[in-house]
Amino acid sequence: MKRVLVHGCIFALLTVLTQLGGIAWLIALLFRRRALVFALAYLALWGAAIGLAPLGNRVPLHCWNQGGLQMKAWVFCAANRNYMAPELLDALKTASGRFEAEFPGSNIQVLDANFPFLDGFPLLPHLSHDDGGKVDIALFYKDGNGNRRETSKSPIGYFAFEDGPTHCPKAWPSLRWDLHWLQPLWPDWPLDDARTKRVVEILVADPRVKKLFIEPHLASRLDLTNSKIRFQGCRAARHDDHIHLQI
């Protein structure tokens, strides 16, 4: 019974994190060289997803893509969290072309998008990345000398929050994590207001983009007033470490 519980927990964790990892683990349980079989099975499923996901109207943004639109970190690709509807990917490519024309050498860096299969399958800890129509992108920063940084403070783009006022009370349960203990670990880079504001303006100007979430204090600071720009609510994750958009 204990072994069943352990393997059940591993299956659940891998499924929650990668969607396909739980299936690979079940396959590995049939063999003695479990770690090797798991790695091979996961690699096979990962590759199959690239070819099969378009049948369900989702396509990947590959980590080996270069140019103005890039995945922020390989972990998102390895965990199958880089899939989106073709319409959303096209909107991002259009935005990145306009953005790079104005800021040569700057990339729009993509964070979590969606899993490859099944509308309604949750991509935790997000509340809404479950239909191919949502994606997060990283904020833009400068160094202490005012030079542009082409990477975010956090290696995965999340959890490096910008300080600002909020009306949200402390509550539980909630995904609104402040993670005060983590903030001193990030580089002391100021937000690049000009690039962050401009990428939001370019995105919301696209009629395919229906909503964009950013923390109210950032929207106020950047003088962003488009009706598509919304507050995600106090129960959802903070959006002053990244930007969420959806079609």
Image (tube, rainbow, N blue to C red):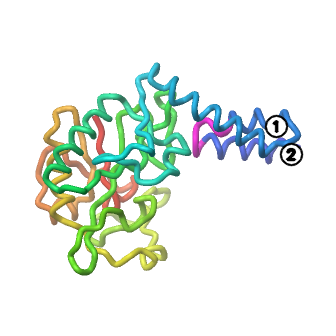
Q: Position of residue 165 (x, y in %)?
A: 25, 70
Q: Residue at x 50, y 38 (%)?
A: 122
Q: Nearer the viewer, residue 8 or 113?
A: 113
Q: Which callout, 2 or 1, points to the residue nearer the camera?
A: 1
Q: Residue at x 31, y 69 (%)?
A: 162
Q: Is residue 54 left or right of residue 212?
A: right
Q: Nearer the viewer, residue 48 or 166?
A: 48
Q: Which mark is residue 3?
A: 2
Instruction: Count up the numbered dots.
Output: 2
Q: Which mark is residue 110?
A: none
Q: Is residue 180 left or right of residue 169?
A: right
Residue that carries the numbered disc 1 in the rendered image: 29
Of mark 2 and mark 1, the one earlier in the sequence is: 2
Q: Label the magenta part by its dominant secondary structure.
A: helix
Instruction: Give the crowd class for mark 2: few <14, some 14-19, many >=20 residues within 10 Å.
Output: few
| Start-end of magenta stretch | 16-22
Q: Residue at x 29, y 51 (%)?
A: 108
Q: In the image, is residue 238 above or below residue 18? A: below
Q: Is residue 197 left or right of residue 113?
A: left
SS of the residue under disc 2:
helix
Q: Residue at x 52, y 23 (%)?
A: 52
Amino acid identity at mark 2:
Arg
Q: Position of residue 78 (x, y in %)?
A: 55, 45
Q: Position of residue 223 (x, y in %)?
A: 11, 60
